[in-house]
Amino acid sequence: MRKHLQMNCGVPKGITSRAILGKLMKANGWFMGPLYLVVFIGMAGCAEYSERTLPILGEPQVDPLTGETTPFIGPDFSFLNQDNEWITQEHVEGKIQVVDFFFASCVTICPIMTRSMVKVQEAFPEDPRLALLSYTIDPAHDTPERLAEYADRYGIDNQQWSLLTGKGEEVFSVSKGYKVMAFDDSLGETPNLIHDGTFVLLDTQRRVRGYYNGLEPTEIDRLIDDIELLLTTL
């Protein structure tokens, strides 16, 4: 697992890179040798790195009576996992969550997405602070038994990563709750299940902190970095 560098470089809180530069100039005159310049640039970079934060996404809810706002959060849910156990939002309360939508018989983008999620799992092995949730949009066929086979095929850690199945209308309602495209466009007996490759990152308060393209390796690297950043706040 890559460690997130929560760097302050030995600089006391509140001391800015501008102040550091001023002290160097005062002590050594206006001329700064290459060594001092390197030190300054490094400290400035550390300051910028330590100040990096993630946005809180989604439109806040406004109480029409009080005017108070509450942040947009991920939806409530209740589905069976690959171990045939009921999983709800209460089971992942206080955890960082990564969410996506897939189905087991998908042969186009789903294998890529699952391998991407495996990469996330491998970056945080057995970390109880992280929960991975993959909702199937084909619950008619993706029973807990079939999802268990899928989990075995990809080496999924059942304690950290839940493959969830339930009623179709409930799954699609949840996808809307995450603002992710997933729907059943089947016509008659011709199946046509549609979803995109989005991964959603939620913090411990279920606030959405990022959307990522689960088909792009660079996006998965960014997701892992953002998870590490959130973990430093726990």
Image: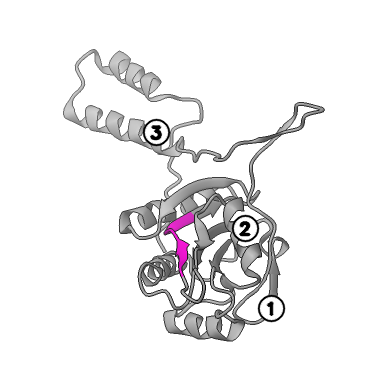
Above/below status of 34 relative to 97:
above
Going by the numbered disc 3, the residue's amino acid type is Glu
| Badge 1 or badge 3: first in the primary sequence | 3
Task: Residue at 38% x, 72% y: name it.
Answer: 111
Q: Quadrant of residue 57?
A: top right
Q: Which residue is mark 3?
A: 48
Does the stretch in magenta take in 195? yes
In the rendered image, which quarter contains the N terminus?
Answer: bottom left
Q: Quadrant of residue 68?
A: top right
Does the stretch in magenta take in 39? no
Q: Position of residue 158 (x, y in %)?
A: 57, 77
Q: Is residue 160 left or right of residue 108?
A: right
Going by the numbered disc 2, the residue's amino acid type is Val
Going by the numbered disc 1, the residue's amino acid type is Glu
Q: Position of residue 214 (x, y in %)?
A: 40, 59
Q: Is residue 90 left or right of residue 129?
A: right
Q: Position of residue 116 (x, y in %)?
A: 39, 65
Label 3: how many Cα within 10 Å (few below 14, some 14–19, many 20+): few
Between 184 and 47, the one lying in front of the other is: 184
| Badge 3 or badge 2: first in the primary sequence | 3
Scheme of colours in the image: one colour
Task: Residue at 64% x, 36% y: name it.
Answer: 60
Helix, strand or loop at label 3? It is helix
| Residues at marks 3 and 2, CA–CA distance in whole angstroms | 37 Å
Residue 85: mark in rendering: 1
Q: Which residue is mark 2?
A: 174
Helix, strand or loop at label 1? It is loop
**Bounds of the magenta span?**
192-199
Between 39 and 209, the one lying in front of the other is: 209
